[in-house]
Image: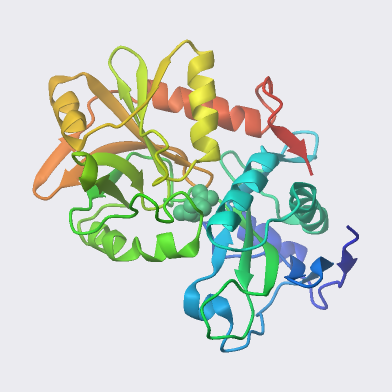
Amino acid sequence: MKFEVTEHPNPTSGERIAEILQNPGFGTNFTDHTTVVDWSADAGWQDARIEPYGPITLDPAASVLHYASEIFEGMKAYLHADGSVYTFRPFANAARMNASARRMALPEIDEELFVQSLEVLVAKDKAWVPASDGEALYLRPFMFGTEAFLGVRPSQTVTYRVIASPAGNFFGGELKPVKIWVSRDYVRAAPGGTGAAKTGGNYAGSLAAQAQAAEKGCQQVLFLDPLHENAIEELGGMNVFLVTNDGCLLTPELTGTILEGVTRSSIIQLAKDRGLTVEERRVGLEEWAKGAADGTIVEAFACGTAAVVTPIGELLDGDQTITMTGDFSTTLALREELLGIQTGKVEDRHGWLHKL
Ligand code: COI
């Protein structure tokens, strides 16, 4: 599809971009442009364009504002040493966006159009891609219902957009092990619900638990599945892995209540490539606590596009603390290899990179 381009009338100066890239933080600065493609039940996807970044005008009755008709993706663009920019497994994100769209009664988008929407935006705002280690341009494709209608049914008009934001460490500052709060008051998802969809409501529903976590000095919250003996599910915004003392990775299986992370599946592949055993199965919180205490579970980490691979140092469950005693060597080796592939320093043997 051809994208019409409207240039930003007052683009950010090179000096200001350099200042932002000195310390990008996470999710607070946005590039000058945004990709937009509109959809209507009558005409399908149409009117693809690049616009200056700015506020969106919405009808107060728009479907997204009342019935949370919204899905999104998280991806990154990485600057390689030769000046070219790549993204990572974009067709996997396109497929996941379409799985979310089916669950949330939003229209599927052609995978090629999804990838093209990233290509055109990064081509326009390439100056915003950070060059430092561990930093990248975070890409946020999202789609929402715009129809002004208070009857409850799928929106007949939808908009798809991509915004981009230079990103450093999601948890701020230097990489260090994070503390996780076990949510006993709230669950994230239930069988048949929307847990596997990347939809804003899942994140809105996690915020009260996340606020409790913050009160306890924790950076993320861990949700459990009380229907299955408190099996661990996922964190507020990322998947979770454990590492045993005999080099096995444990991660919750995809039961339909957790998100199928692209980072999660990449880590599983990289671990298998190293000869590690990966068990995707139900892991009870009790198994984690016992394993940490008797030294059979030594490392834990969070993973996602934003979090990359972040060691988990402690888990707080009420007044009990589960402490990971390992040296995080497996966690950090997997992180290093994943980032190495993404930034072009390690051979891309699975063909995961896509040039933008
Ligand atoms: C991502 O990892 O890209 C996400 O969408 C999660 C969010 C917590 C930033």
Q: State the scheme by which the image is colored.
A: rainbow
288 relative to 124, above or below: above
Where is residue 34? Give x, y as percent. Answer: 73, 66
339 relative to 136, above or below: above
State which quarter of the image contains the N terminus. bottom right
Q: Is residue 49 visible?
A: no
Q: Is residue 310 visible?
A: yes
> Which image quadrant for residue 211?
bottom left
* Identity of the residue drawn at 50% across and 28% down: 267
Of residues 146 and 176, the one nearer the viewer is 146
Q: Is residue 19 left or right of residue 216?
A: right
Of residues 253 and 18, the one nearer the viewer is 253
Where is residue 181? Give x, y as percent. Answer: 23, 50
Where is residue 177? Give x, y as percent. Answer: 33, 39
> Which image quadrant for residue 57?
bottom right
State which quarter of the image contains the C terminus. top right
